[in-house]
Image (cartoon, rainbow, N blue to C red):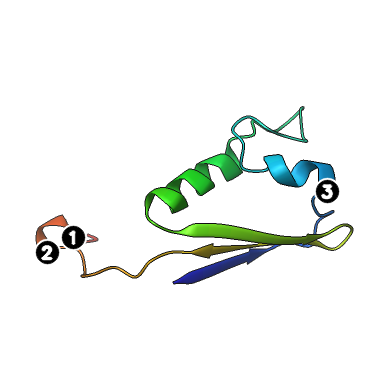
Amino acid sequence: MELRFEDQGCGIREEDKANIFTPYFTTKAEVGTGLGLATVHSIVTRHGGMINFATMLGRGTTFTLYLPAAKSAAPEENATQAN
């Protein structure tokens, strides 16, 4: 499965690209913790997937997550019902 997220922000600077998935790395010292992309990367890779990105300064960034297909649906006993 492929999931794609796109923004129209400022893009990622060349010198920051190597660190965007590093825990606690942030370019927003006043408001960011640097855990968002690191957490997403960890979850995706632990499930056998991968995450790529394409960015252009002044135009934004697109993240593409690739996740393996499930072998089967969740068992009935784990399903929850909405009341």
Q: Residue at x 44, y 72 (%)?
A: 1
Q: Which residue is mark 2?
A: 76
Amino acid type at circle 3 is: Glu
Amino acid type at circle 1 is: Ala
Q: Which residue is mark 1?
A: 79
- Dots 2 and 1: beta carbons under 8 Å? yes
Amino acid type at circle 2 is: Glu
Depth check: give the residue in front, 28 or 66: 66
Foreground mark, 1 or 3, reads: 3
Q: Which residue is the extreme one toward the right?
A: 58
Q: Which residue is mark 3?
A: 14
Task: Specify few, some or many for label 2: CA neighbours under 10 Å numbering under 14, 14-19, or 20 or more.
Answer: few
Task: Specify few, some or many for label 3: CA neighbours under 10 Å numbering under 14, 14-19, or 20 or more.
Answer: few
Residue 27 x/y as whole percent: 77, 36
Q: Which mark is residue 12?
A: none
Foreground mark, 2 or 3, reads: 3
Residue 45 x/y as whole percent: 44, 51
Task: Specify few, some or many for label 1: CA neighbours under 10 Å numbering under 14, 14-19, or 20 or more.
Answer: few
